[in-house]
Structure formats: structure tokens, C-alpha cells
Amino acid sequence: MDRLFLKSVPILELIEEAGYEAYFVGGSVRDYILGRPINDVDIATSATPQEIKRIFPNTADIGIDHGTVLVITDTGTYEITTFRTESGYSDFRRPDAVQFVRSLTEDLQRRDFTMNAMAMDKTGKIIDPFNGKCDLAEKRIITVGNPHERFHEDALRMMRALRFVSQLDFELDQETFDSLKENAQIISEIAVERILVEFEKLVAGSNKIRAFSLLLESGLYQYLPLFSSKKDHLMDLLNLPLHQLKAAEIWSIIMVHTKDQEMEKALRAWKLPLKTIRNVKSTIQLVKKEPSAFDVFQAGHGVTVQAAKVRAALTGGNVSDAEEDAHRRYNELIIKQMSDLAVTGTDLLNWHQEKPGPWVKEYLENILKAVLNEELRNDKEEIKRWLVKCNLS
Ligand code: ATP
Ligand code: MG
């Protein structure tokens, strides 16, 4: 068993000693069988949240309405969720009622795909009532039960299906795909924040080209912010080396032909963090020019590399070569930050006996450009002489 599971076995034992059942469930069991790295383990139990709180002295109610209690121990923190079923789903997204149950199978049945509906006990035995292991072996994503019903219960599952295609390099079962295509429009009932979480995982996955292709083929793209007007551009993406690009680079490619104002609106509609929005905008600006040393300085290392990769991807160039080249260009900059410049605004004010004003910034920028272009050495005396020579003093 994986180290993370072994570390959590005493937690299962404590719950069992109190007279309840406890298992590892969900993504960690799936990834363990696949031999993929495991980041966290989810534990499901027949004990109610109140019963869990009686077993463990130190807990936090992180999602107690849905049955999840955070157990804090000396060895770590563990999310423990009571077996539950869900019913209602009148709005395609949230169950109207959550019921705690004592049966593991009922809990596994509410889960989205067969590969995510397995449990493992403390000895490593797999409990697999829906044949998830077989679907894993055949790299198949298939809903637990009728896909139409399952997507109507929670439309986010359609987006999850595509992110697993990308993440695991799996295919969708035909009936599951047909149903996804038929029900695509109900994804618009889902909060963009939840869609974004899955989309970012899709974009980070190894087979994003296949996932993008299914996003288009199923029609799901039409109901995502901005995408409905971009079918041709999204189709073009399928021919690009997306596997070599990270999330911000892919966002930049998606937005590269979008006008500035519209881009801001679209990225905000996707509820991307402001930091990412700024990053994407700077990257696109740099993609559109042959950057000078000054541009590279202003953009910084991250944006310079991203822009170089995006430009190479869009123009059929070699992405890794472009990345290396951009690293080199940045590293070769004579100065990397304003404080590396041998003169400061105060020096200029002392030399010129003039009132502070916009001229200081302008002069500094001219000096900076000359130094970056290696027309001027980054040396205080030389800069002073240069200013006199250029009539800038
Ligand atoms: P990851 O490795 O990316 O965390 P995961 O499968 O663990 O993938 P989570 O979102 O962490 O995904 O969900 C944990 C488990 O909860 C899933 O494996 C699945 O059993 C269940 N689950 C999550 N979201 C849904 C959903 N929308 N509908 C039904 N079951 C879900
Ligand atoms: Mg998980």
C-alpha cells in the first residue's frame, strides 16, 4: 500500500474499534490501482459526523451538512465523510437532500464514474460493486448507472468526464458520450467557479487535445464563457502542440485573437484570478512583437518564457527550443531589476538641479534602454558622461 494509505490505517482502525466501518474511497483508490501518485486520501465511514466527533477529540466541521468532518491528529489531518445518498437535484446541480446511510454500496452508487466508485479497506482489499477495476483496465470512463440521470443530477459530471479524459488519457464509453452530447446545455446551470476547477485540470492533463476535441464534438463548448463564438479558433487549437503548454499559455492561445476589452470581460466571466488575467494579457502583448531586451526586462522571466512558447506554438516553431532561448535571453539581460541600475532618480535630481517631475522617469528609462541594449555600460560615471553627450543634461 502507498505510504499515505499506511499512515491513515490507524484512523480506520480507531473508527472500526468504535464499532463502525471505514474505507478509503474515490480518487485515491483509483490512482493507487493505476499506479499514479497520490496526493491525499479520502475516508468514508458508516459513522455519522457526531459519532466521528466522539471518537476523535480534535475535529473541525468543514462540511458537516454534507457529512464531512476534518479530523486533526498528531500524524496529520484527515477528511472523513459519512456514507450518504443524495436525492432531489431539481436544479441539475445540488441535491435537495443528503441522507446519511450505513451502507458502503449505497455511498459508492452516488459517485460519478465506476472508476471513482471503489473502496479499499485497511488491508488493501478492493470493494468494487460497479466493475470499476475492469473499466480502469480498459481505460474507460463510464457513469455509475444511467448517464442521462446522472448528468441531470449534477451536470458538472460532464465536465469531470472530459477532465478525466485529459488527466488519465482515457476514453468515454459510447453511451456516456452520447448522453453528454444530448445533455450538453445543462452545464449552463453550473456555477462557473466549479466548471473552472475542472477545466483547469483538463488543461493540465496529458491528453488535453483529445479532451478539447470532445469538448467541441459534444457541443459542451457552446455553453462555456466566450467559447460559443470561437469554434473555428478552438478547432485550430487541436493542431497545436498543446501537450507542451501550461494553463496560462493555453489561455493566451485561446484569447490571442480577442480584442483587449473583450478579453478582459471573457477572462472575468471565467472567474479567473486577477493575477492570471494580468499574466495572460501581458503574455499576449509580448507574443505580438519581436521583443527587445527592454520588453524582456519589463515582462519578467515568467511572461517572457510563456510568450516565447506561445509564439512558437502558433507559428509552427519548436516549443522547447523557444523556451530555452527565452530562458537564455532573460538570463543574459545586463540588469534584471531597476535597482540593478547604477544610477537612481536621486542621482539625476542631484546632477540636474531641476524640480522632480516626469522627466526623471523618462531619463531613467532612456538610460535603462541604452544599458540593456549594451550601448552604455552600467557604470555611474559613464552614465553621467553619456547624459551630457546626449544633451540630456
Ligand atoms: P482528483 O485526483 O483530481 O482529486 P477525484 O476523483 O479525487 O480526482 P474529487 O473532486 O476530489 O475527484 O472527488 C472525490 C470523489 O468524490 C470522486 O472520486 C468521486 O467518487 C466523488 N465525486 C466528486 N465529485 C462528484 C460529482 N460531481 N458527482 C458524483 N461524485 C463525485
Ligand atoms: Mg480528490
Image (cartoon, rainbow, N blue to C red):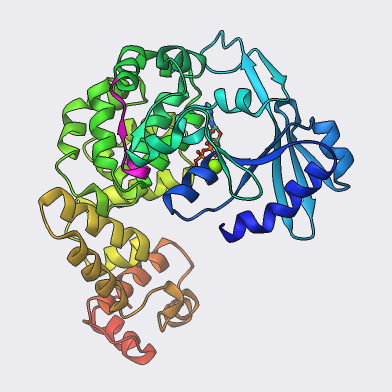
The spot of residue 146 in percent (x, y) is: 43, 15
Ligand 2 falls in quadrant: top right
In terms of depth relative to the viewer, which is nearer, 198 or 121? Answer: 121
Residue pushed farthest left? 316
- Give the left or right position of residue 171, taking residue 127 as reference: left
Q: Residue at x 71, y 18 (%)?
A: 99
Q: Is residue 342 above or below residue 246?
A: below
Question: Is residue 379 one of those drawn in magenta?
Answer: no
Q: State the count of labels.
A: 0
Residue range corresponding to the magenta coloring: 166-174
Question: Is residue 167 one of those drawn in magenta?
Answer: yes
Q: Residue at x 41, y 84 (%)?
A: 342
Split into 4 quadrants, where in the image is the N terminus? Answer: bottom right
Split into 4 quadrants, where in the image is the C terminus? Answer: bottom left
The spot of residue 256 in percent (x, y) is: 24, 41
Q: Is residue 259 above or below residue 207?
A: above
- Give the left or right position of residue 370, taking residue 35 as reference: left
Q: Is residue 367 above or below residue 318?
A: below
Task: State the image quarter where residue 182 is shown.
Answer: top left
Task: State whether residue 259 appears in this view.
Answer: no
The spot of residue 86 in percent (x, y) is: 63, 18
The spot of residue 38 in percent (x, y) is: 52, 53
Task: State whether residue 203 appears in this view.
Answer: yes
In terms of depth relative to the viewer, which is nearer, 122 or 265? Answer: 122
